[in-house]
Amino acid sequence: MMSRLLSLGLASVLAAVVLLTGSIGTVPSVRAVSPAYDKEILWFRHCLAWERTTTPNTACVYGDRTSNRVIALVGDSHASHLFPAVDRIARAHGWKLVVMVKVSCGFADMRIRNLALGREYTECARWNRAVVRRLGVIRPALTVVAMSRRALHAVRWVDRTTTAKGLAVGRMIERVPGRVSILVDAPYAGRNVPRCIARYGARRCAIPRTTALSYGLGAVERVAVAHSHARSINLTSATCATWPCPVRVRGITVFRDREHFTATFARSVLGAPGGVLDRALVLRMP
């Protein structure tokens, strides 16, 4: 709760930075202050929906807004932290980008709990139904789905297996018209990366392979792909080119906390022209 309040307190300052710089995908000055606040602009444009929200904000359109070729970004905060990369790619190729992302709300057909609310996350189920309805209206050429493997807290015991979660994601994807790509979740840092770097330096904070791949990285996505018309995109090699996984790449801090990318890393590295994500999305676009 305290981190949420701090983030909201910075919103007005960051919005002013955006107005001055014209930046959409990331806020350059934030990284100069602290990687912990290097967040995607969706945080400050009411485009990352909070817990109580049940309907996507139709104003959250990025990329080339005049284009007839539409790509959609759907999922939870792990979809949101990839926005700077997808937005950069969409702009480069002249695609309109429609964003529908919500905190702790995986794109899955299952009853889940929200730990912050301390109860069943009924708002997530309503949100996902609204997302599917809107996708049916706008009919994007490609829908990109991403979510945290650690945030699917199933209500029912029978849904707490990897297979059950993957099947639930697959069922939701089958309701989406057109092509769908599901992004394999981000590696897990296991510690607050900016704090670790400040105390020990980037080299000592490199992430062991076992930690980065923990919680069954990619397992839910494999089941979902096997039971839906989606194809997967794995960015792990682009994030962890060597082991242990570096927490700084080209002088850019990779994570702003334990599991979310900094906006600068997402845009500059994962969204780079000709990179893994760029090639995969171009290949998947009809």
Image (tube, rainbow, N blue to C red):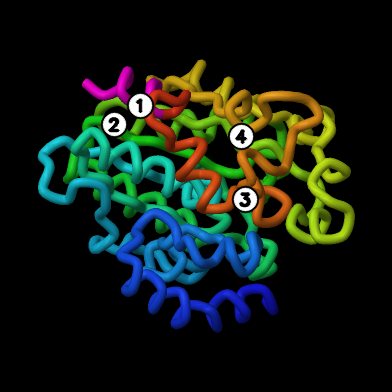
Q: For residue 23, what is the image quadrant?
A: bottom left
Task: Return the residue nearer the eye: 59 or 175.
Answer: 59
Q: Find residue 80 and report its horizontal and vertical position in percent.
A: 47, 51
- Mark-to-mark CA distance, 4 and 1: 25 Å
Q: Are marks 2 and 3 in contact (CB under 8 Å)?
A: no
Name the mark nearer the viewer: 3 or 4: 3
Is residue 162 visible in this depiction of the protein?
yes
Q: Which circle's residue, 4 or 1, is located before the other in the chain?
A: 4
What's the mark number on residue 260? 3
Q: Which circle's residue, 1 or 3, is located before the other in the chain?
A: 3
Q: Find residue 178 and report its horizontal and vertical position in percent.
A: 25, 27
- Residue in the image at 47% along x and 58% along y: 40
Is disc 3 placed on a helix, strand or loop?
Answer: loop
- Residue in the image at 28% along x and 49% along y: 98
Instruction: Give the residue pinned by disc 1.
Output: 281
Instruction: Give the residue pinned by disc 2.
Output: 142
Q: Residues within 10 Å of mark 1 (few under 14, many from 20)?
A: some
Task: Return the residue nearer the eye: 25 or 99.
Answer: 25
Residue type at numbered disc 1: Leu
Task: Return the residue nearer the eye: 255 or 71.
Answer: 255
- Mark-to-mark CA distance, 2 and 1: 8 Å
- Mark-to-mark CA distance, 2 and 3: 24 Å
Q: Which circle's residue, 2 or 3, is located before the other in the chain?
A: 2
Q: What are the residue bounds of the magenta stretch? A: 278-286
Is residue 152 visible in this depiction of the protein?
no
Residue type at numbered disc 2: Leu
